[in-house]
Image (cartoon, rainbow, N blue to C red):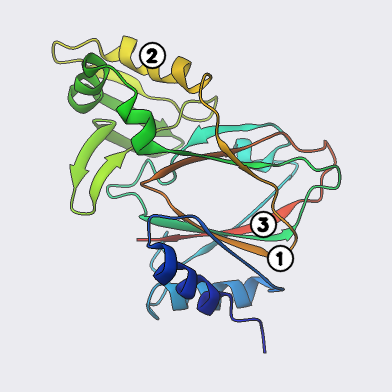
Amino acid sequence: MPVRHVDRLRRALVETGENKICVANGRLCSAQFSEQLRDLRGGAAPSHPFGTVRTIEIVKTPQGVADTASAHDWHTDGNLLLIPPRYFVLYFDRVDEIGGGISTFYPIRSLLSSLPWWVIEALATTQVKLARDTFRWTGTLLAIDRCGLNFRWRFDKDLRPEVVDARGTQGKQAIDYVKEIMTEKHPIEYAARRGDLIFVPNRLYLHGRSPLALESSRRLYRGWIE
């Protein structure tokens, strides 16, 4: 019987609240991770993209930066969805041989509280477009939806916001300001171990990772929870 990661996570969530990053450790295969993900979703059947499992590792034909050895800048997940996931879960099946792929996290509320008002106003007003392959989303990077505060952020070679209508604000300058100020922030760093299962509130933390070895065998499974 597999280690009950989900039970450990639930105990941690009760103790710390659902606004914390929680970690458990044990050995799982992909099918067992899917089972754990279903349990965390209250037994709900997979409904793409929620409850489905994505394998992230270096491949010859990458879907994006996550499938390469490059560093992954801070971002939130599911930015092209109408309602992004509230949480995501990562399982580290294999880790980088030379210690690369350090996970980084930064509290979104701490970032927002450090921004001047003109930037907040622009983020909540400017209409931007996010587009990748056949997927499109248009709206404001900062908003309130049915799940609460929602800050969409991704700015890299795969996906970045394109201003459609600044609506009288300094929209482009605000986006550039956020991009620049992130370089001055000091994130939480975590060197995951093989077998780590990490539960992250997507709406409360930006996340990223450091570069990997060029031939890294690092492999992890990721699932979203609505």
- Which SS class for mark 1? loop
Question: Residue 184 location, x and y as percent?
Answer: 52, 19
Q: Quadrant of residue 25?
A: bottom right
In the picture, the quarter occupied by the N terminus is bottom right
Mark 2–mark 1 Cα distance, whole angstroms, equals 38 Å
Mark 2 Cα within 10 Å, few/some/many (few <14, many 20+)?
Answer: some
Mark 1–mark 3 Cα distance, whole angstroms, equals 9 Å
Q: In screen coordinates, is 3 left or right of 88?
A: right
Mark 3 Cα within 10 Å, few/some/many (few <14, many 20+)?
Answer: many
Residue linked to disc 3 = 220
Q: Earlier in the sequence, mark 1 or mark 3?
A: 1
Q: Amino acid at mark 3?
A: Leu
Residue linked to disc 2 = 177
Residue 82 badge: none
Q: Amino acid at mark 2?
A: Tyr
Residue, x 82% and y 37% (percent of image)? Answer: 213
**135, above or below 1, in the image:** above
The residue lying toward the viewer, choosing from 147 and 222, is 147
The residue lying toward the viewer, choosing from 122 and 9, is 9
Q: Amino acid at mark 1?
A: Gly
Q: Nearer the viewer, mark 1 or mark 3?
A: 1
Residue, x 52% and y 75% (percent of image)? Answer: 6
Residue linked to disc 1 = 195
